[in-house]
Image (cartoon, rainbow, N blue to C red):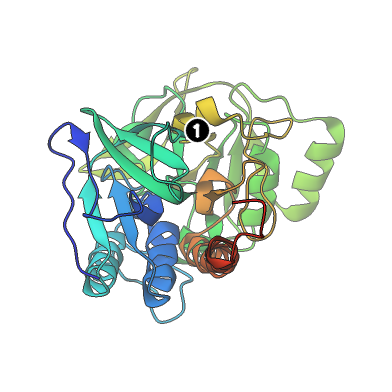
Amino acid sequence: MNGTASSTAGGTVNRALGDGGYDVVVIGAGAGGLNAALVLARARRRVAVVDAGEPRNAPSAHMRGFLSRDGMPPAALLEVGRREVAGYGVDLIDGSVDTVLPAPGPTPAPARFSVRLAGGAVVRARHVVLATGLRDELPELPGVRERWGKDVLFCPYCHGYEFRDRAIGVLGTHPGAVGHALLLRQWSADVVLFSHTLEPSGDERARLAARGVRVEEGEVKRLAVEDGTLRGVELAEGRAVPCEAAFLVPGMVPRDGMLADLGCARDGNGWLVTDRAGRTSVPGVWAVGNVADPRAQVVTAAGTGAAAAFALNLELVEEDVERSLPVPVGQG
């Protein structure tokens, strides 16, 4: 089952297969994509994984809440995962995908999709699993981007415990900031919501007060960082409020532009519509992890990758059976 593939040149990237390509091409080598590839490879499917090397959690030093992997550096998990799938014969292709298109004729029958990489190379596949995650859009406040993933954070379940019983600030840069502040109060009695450009309603203020979260009015000017550590939040009026961690809700944009030409259905917020197994509205196209669910943590993404692989392999079995059936007399 072992083979080789390369995205360094134009042309067609495939094993020398009579059927025109891979059973499955997985786009994205995060936890979801690698777990899908692992399950499919163990089912003896021909699998390639294309990855641009831009994991969402790269700024974080550790993963949390993943049983047996709690505290493991994200890069270490991916390194182990790549090594595991390669051991089952999965082809790992370093590169980014420009677009996924229906395979043009005269492509051999089983290959339904052409996955075009940056630089012109093409990978053909019967099914495609999108596991490219999402992009966090951060507010343009001095200090936010520099400290992102360190002491400027998003996920309370990933980082709240590390800042338990310490001064926590929540930046009012997103409508979800009030809910975020209410949740973070679970980890610390010292939580402050910086209203910034957000104006909490009367009901929201009452809920914050009932939870013991205070509100600092006024716009935020910058984050006060000294010696590579967050010291507080400086308001436009010049006053600085001490805190040791600042949480915010980023804008979340799925990395799914390569599917634009396929016409996959989307919900009212622009996210891909999938069923519980990860099927999109286009037969043969699947989406797992953060590209379909912004709430998915690493452990969740890995689970969705496995679930999609189980269902996908069953569909491949059905396709294989249909192809093997004898052609009825008179229909040949």
The picture places residue 131, in percent across and down from the top left corner, at 45, 50
Asked if residue 331 is positioned above or below residue 35 in the image, the reply reads above
- The residue at 69%/51% (across/down) is 182
Asked if residue 213 is positioned above or below residue 69 in the image, the reply reads above
Q: Residue furthest right?
A: 203
Residue 167 visible in the snapshot? yes
Q: Residue furthest left?
A: 8
Q: Nearer the viewer, residue 63 or 183?
A: 63
The picture places residue 255, in percent across and down from the top left corner, at 46, 36
Asked if residue 38 is positioned above or below residue 272 in the image, the reply reads below
Q: Nearer the viewer, residue 26 or 134?
A: 26
The picture places residue 46, in percent across and down from the top left corner, at 34, 63
Residue beneath disc 1: 259
Mark 1: which amino acid? Leu
- The residue at 46%/73% (across/down) is 66
Q: Residue furthest top?
A: 237
Q: Residue furthest bottom?
A: 68
- The residue at 52%/49% (across/down) is 290
Asked if residue 125 is positioned above or below residue 115 in the image, the reply reads below
Which quadrant of the figure has residue 267? top right
Mark 1 surroundings within 10 Å by alpha-carbon count, few (fewer than 14), some (14 through 19), many (20 or more):
some
Q: Nearer the viewer, residue 142 or 11?
A: 11
- The residue at 55%/70% (across/down) is 310
Q: Nearer the viewer, residue 195 or 298?
A: 298
User: Image check: 223 left or right of 290?
Assistant: left
Q: Secondary structure at mark 1?
A: helix
Residue 130 visible in the snapshot? no
Which quadrant of the figure has residue 36? bottom left
The picture places residue 132, in percent across and down from the top left corner, at 42, 45
